Image: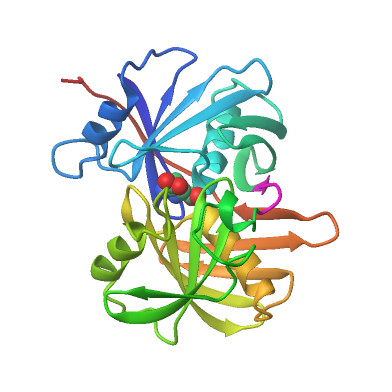
Amino acid sequence: MKFTKMHGIGNDYVYVNCFQEKVDNPSEVAKFVSDRHFGVGSDGLILIKPSQIADCEMDMYNLDGSQGAMCGNGIRCVAKYVYDYGIVPKTTLRIATKSGIKELNLTVENGKVSLVRVNMGSPILEASKIPVVSDQSQAVNQPIKVNGHTYYFTGVSMGNPHAVVYLDDVDNLDIEKIGPAFEKHPVFPDRVNTEFVKVIDRKTLKMRVWERGSGETLACGTGACAVAVSSILNNLTGEEVTVKLLGGDLKIHWDRLENLVYMTGPATTVFDGEITLP
Ligand SMILES: N[C@@H](CCC[C@H](N)C(=O)O)C(=O)O
């Protein structure tokens, strides 16, 4: 199987061009290629497919083989891939995902894609649609008991479920312990991606993420969008923020008038390769 390893601020995936390749059993392939010792090493697998309704389609799988409906860092890389390989030679394009069609704009400098801006659509706040178990219609600053401690989270779906938790210190967090406990908590029937956030100022947030199906990653695009939305709902920031993640920064803007979230960040190709599947 021919593939390309790419990352969006360190959130790395194995990308397969399904205009040319056929991938049977993508869940198993995701588990195999993601392994950092016996495979390629990645947070998961992303298939770039032809689409009848958009310029192409993104089909994403986490490291554990589960399918994700949306991937913010992944979709920026898909846009760069189809542009660089001449599959979609346009700087404004539409990519179909399991959570709808997203519109993207590429900034190209000296022939190279430097930044990708994605219209991530409207956040879903209705608790039952995220899904989050709640006795309120929205889960904003909702208490939750995890590993014997009470935390407060805000539930947001950006096509996939997120729980945003504010802490004074995210650097010394034992995320390997707390992350899985949030992910599998009964309050989140479809499991959850959890963002642990420190507010730096009204324009800057720092976060670490425990991703459903992949564990701690260096960045999560949908997670950064959920954090920006949650921070406005909790009156912690304005509409435009920089989210600082372990792998780099993303600019997020929740345009309240249009009710649309825009994410801007880089996309990077690491190498092309070929692997024999078992
Ligand atoms: N890394 C992604 C999100 C990938 C999917 C997620 N783990 C899920 O299962 O919902 C991003 O950049 O958004």
Q: Residue at x 60, y 77 (%)?
A: 204
Work out whether residue 192 or residue 37 is closer to the camera in this orientation and state it. Answer: 192
Q: Residue at x 31, y 29 (%)?
A: 27
Q: Which range of residues does the magenta coloring cover?
A: 117-123
Position of 95 compared to 175: left or right?
Answer: right
Q: Please tell me whether residue 128 is drawn above or below residue 22 in the rendered image.
A: below
Residue 227 inside the magenta-drawn segment: no
Q: Position of residue 208 (x, y in %)?
A: 41, 68
Q: Is residue 83 visible?
A: yes
Position of 69 compared to 62: left or right?
Answer: right
Q: Position of residue 147 (x, y in %)?
A: 27, 75
> Picture quarter containing residue 108?
top right
Work out whether residue 43 or residue 101 is closer to the camera in this orientation and state it. Answer: 101
Q: Please tell me whether residue 121 is drawn above or below residue 1 in the rendered image.
A: below
Q: Residue at x 68, y 72 (%)?
A: 233
Work out whether residue 65 or residue 199 is closer to the camera in this orientation and state it. Answer: 65
Position of 111 compared to 218: left or right?
Answer: right
Which quadrant, please, contains the C terminus? top left
Q: Please tell me whether residue 244 is drawn above or below residue 28 in the rendered image.
A: below
The image shows a total of numbered marks equal to: 0
Q: Is residue 267 visible?
A: no
Q: Position of residue 191 (x, y in %)?
A: 39, 52
Q: Position of residue 135 (x, y in %)?
A: 56, 66
